[in-house]
Image (cartoon, rainbow, N blue to C red):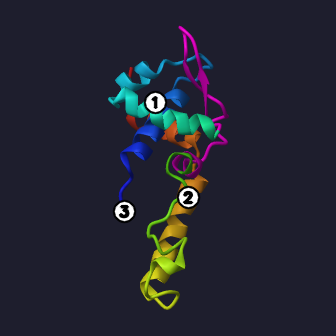
Amino acid sequence: MQFTKAEEYGTLGVLYLAEKKSSSVTPLSEISEAKKIPEKFLAKIFQSLSKSGIVRSHRGVRGGFTLAKDPNTVTIKEILESIQGPYHLCKCIPDINACPQGQECALRDLIVMAEDRLVSVFDSHTLADLVKWQQDKYATPS
C-alpha cells in the first residue's frame, strides 16, 4: 500500500494551513513553495478539499486558502477521502464481484481486517494531532 502523491500533497498542504494558526488567507504559491509541491497539481487537489469543505478558497488579488474547519474536527480519513474517495486496499473490498474468488477468500478476509484497522487510525487522528506531532517532534529549538 502506498499513498498517492495527491493524498500526500493534499495532507501536507492542509497541515501547512493548520500550522499557521491564523485565519489569514494563504496563497497557494506559498504552500507550494514551502512544501515543494507543484503549484498546478496542488491547485487541483485543493479544489477537491474545497468542495468537501475542509479548506475555503478566497479569490482576488489577495486570494488563497484558509482552513474551513477547526483542525480538531478534521480527521485524516476525511482529508484522504476528499482527495481520492473512499479508502480501500483492494478492489474487491467495496465490490465483491471484482474478485473471481467472491466471498470465499481468506486473503480478502485478512485485507478487510487490515483495512478496518488502517481506516480506524486515519479516523481517530485529526489534523490538530498532526500539527502537535509536527511541533513536538520536528520543531527546531530556539
Q: Which residue is mark 3?
A: 1
Q: Tell me the distance, in whole angstroms, between the alpha carbons under discs 2 and 3.
A: 15 Å
**Residue range (magenta):** 53-80
- Nearer-N-terminus badge (2/3): 3
On residue 86, which mark appears? 2
Q: What amino acid type is highlighted by mark number 1?
A: Ala
The answer to whether marks 1 and 2 mark residues whose Cβ atoms lie closer than 8 Å is no
On residue 123, which mark appears? none
Instruction: Describe residue 2's horizontal placement relative to residue 136 as left or right.
Output: left
Residue furthest out toward the bottom: 104
* Of labels 2 and 3, the one closer to you: 2
Q: What amino acid type is highlighted by mark number 2?
A: Pro
Q: Answer whether residue 27 is magenta in the image.
A: no
Residue 106 in picture, x, y percent from top left: 45, 88
Residue 97 in view, yes or no: yes
Q: Quadrant of the N terminus?
A: bottom left
Q: What amino acid type is highlighted by mark number 3?
A: Met
- Nearer-N-terminus badge (1/2): 1
Secondary structure of the residue carrying numbered label 2? loop
Q: Answer whether residue 73 is magenta in the image.
A: yes
Residue 70 in picture, x, y percent from top left: 67, 34
Disc 1: CA contacts within 10 A as few (<14), some (14-19) or many (>=20): some
- Nearer-N-terminus badge (1/3): 3
